């Protein structure tokens, strides 16, 4: 029987190459060339990550009683190693990179939403896979369950894709509900949505505050992490951790728990912490000019990520540049930040975003270049100019990377 690959992007191409090498009958289609006649002799449809649950291919598959799954599920059925899966609204890529660094000696496959489709791990016969998973990818699984699952946080991101909050939460919880007692779930204690999730796996928590009695995991106090079990508490020094912000401390704590569960010693973890680096376009320092610092957080597509970026500089005056294609969320929360000196709003939905912000000084600009140059013109020594859009990039750019590169080019051109 034939497999239909739906989607011709990076994932579709990797899957088609795998099918070719393994002599698996397949056809590949997308919205431009699919017709129902293609489904003759098709046993399984494998959709690419960006295909939403309300897409007509799901309805057609249900009508014809054809199994429809995502690429993660398909690869999972063929993979024979250990799986670490990392999900959440924000921080997935950074946490995945931290885990990969801690477990480098195990020569893991690193991919999923992080860049390389999971099917590559099958092809390379890897024994360990570290996967960053979006809600898109988890939604299209049926049996997928990791050995170690990490749920960083849940915000109402991607409501443009999921339509309803219930679908979004279901996507995030789905793989955890399937985990058994042999698995380990690493959860954010500081969020009720993640703290109270009911799953059969062993639960470890991370928190920016001391964990209460009865909870195992890790918490942060000053320049130290404390790994707490039923019987012991062990300190890990993080005074040489270079990344700014509480959100990066949370990402670090989650990745340290993964490392501990995976058998890495506390001494080795402590040794590697100074080597951890921020990923491009994630509150990334770009340049200092005349005492004014520029930070690029182009990866930010949610109001929650904007808040975390602003909070990274709680002792500094911040000139904030936001905007793009609005995805949902309440930008009025920015009114409460006393360290925001000025906000510039760009992009297609700038007027909508502007209407939500009542108590901060706001200026709208048509282009990113104009916003950056005006921000620099009005900045003073010691100020931070932070580009953290909190919106999708597709109104003005191909993706967040192109958007981030444009910001860097503008900053480098300043004198």
Image: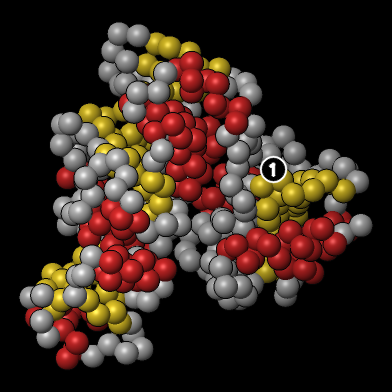
For label 1, the SS is: loop
Residue 142 at x, y = what percent?
A: 17, 57
Can residue 87 be seen in this snapshot? no
Q: Is residue 107 depicted above or below 228 in this figure? A: below
**Mark 1 neighbour density, 10 Å: few (under 14) some (14–19) many (20 or more):** few
**Direction top: furthest residue:** 231
The C terminus lies in which quarter of the figure? bottom right
Residue 151 at x, y = what percent?
A: 35, 42
Q: Residue at x 58, y 47 (%)?
A: 279
Q: How is the image coloured?
A: secondary structure
The one nearer the camera, 190 or 49, is 49
The N terminus lies in which quarter of the figure? bottom left
Q: Is residue 99 depicted above or below 159 in this figure? A: above
Q: Which residue is mark 1?
A: 338
The one nearer the camera, 118 or 400, is 118
The one nearer the camera, 99 or 284, is 99
Query: With 280 as the anchor, is 31 left or right in this view?
Result: left
Query: With 67 as the anchor, is 33 left or right in this view?
Result: right
Q: Residue at x 31, y 71 (%)?
A: 16
Can residue 379 be seen in this snapshot? yes
The one nearer the camera, 364 or 407, is 407
Query: With 65 as the anchor, is 353 left or right in this view?
Result: right
Q: Residue at x 33, y 62 (%)?
A: 136
Residue 319 at x, y = what percent?
A: 75, 52
Residue 190 at x, y = what percent?
A: 41, 34
State which quadrant residue 229 falls in. top left
Q: How many marks?
A: 1
**Direction left: furthest residue:** 65
Q: Residue at x 34, y 28 (%)?
A: 262
Query: With 399 as the anchor, is 27 left or right in this view?
Result: left
């Amino acid at each position: 029987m034939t497999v239909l690959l739906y989607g011709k992007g990076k994932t579709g191409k990797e899957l088609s190459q795998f099918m070719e090498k393994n002599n698996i009958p397949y056809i590949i289609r997308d919205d431009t060339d699919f017709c129902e006649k293609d489904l003759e002799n098709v046993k399984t449809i494998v959709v690419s990550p960006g295909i939403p649950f309300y897409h007509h291919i799901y309805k057609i598959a249900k009508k014809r009683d054809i199994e429809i799954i995502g690429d993660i599920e398909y690869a999972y059925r063929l993979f024979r190693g250990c799986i670490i899966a990392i999900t959440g609204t924000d921080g997935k890529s950074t946490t995945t990179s931290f885990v990969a660094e801690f477990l480098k000696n195990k020569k893991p496959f690193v991919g999923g939403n992080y860049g390389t489709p999971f099917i590559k791990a099958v092809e390379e016969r890897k024994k360990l896979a570290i996967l960053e998973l979006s809600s898109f990818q988890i939604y299209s699984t049926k049996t997928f369950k990791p050995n170690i699952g990490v749920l960083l946080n849940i915000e109402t991101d991607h409501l443009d894709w999921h339509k309803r909050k219930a679908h979004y939460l279901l996507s995030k919880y789905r793989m955890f509900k399937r985990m058994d007692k042999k698995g380990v779930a690493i959860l954010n204690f500081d969020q009720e949505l993640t703290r109270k999730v009911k799953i059969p796996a062993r639960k470890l928590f991370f928190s920016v505050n001391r964990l209460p009695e009865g909870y195992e995991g890790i918490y942060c106090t000053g320049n130290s992490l404390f790994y707490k079990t039923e019987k012991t508490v062990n300190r890990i020094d993080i005074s040489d951790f270079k990344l700014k912000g509480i959100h990066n401390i949370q990402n670090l704590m989650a990745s340290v728990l993964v490392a501990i569960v995976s058998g890495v010693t506390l001494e080795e973890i402590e040794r590697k912490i100074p080597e951890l680096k921020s990923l491009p376009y994630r509150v990334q320092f770009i340049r200092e000019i005349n005492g004014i610092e520029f930070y690029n957080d182009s990866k930010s597509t949610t109001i929650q990520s904007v808040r975390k970026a602003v909070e990274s500089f709680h002792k500094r005056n911040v000139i904030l540049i936001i905007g793009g294609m609005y995805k949902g969320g309440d930008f009025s929360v920015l009114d409460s930040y006393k360290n925001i000196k000025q906000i510039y709003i760009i992009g297609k939905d700038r007027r909508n975003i502007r209407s939500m912000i009542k108590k901060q000084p706001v200026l709208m600009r048509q282009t990113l270049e104009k916003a950056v140059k005006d921000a620099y013109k009005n900045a003073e020594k010691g100020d931070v100019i932070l580009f953290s859009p909190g919106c999708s990039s597709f109104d003005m750019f191909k993706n967040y990377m192109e958007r981030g590169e444009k910001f860097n080019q503008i900053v480098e051109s300043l004198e």
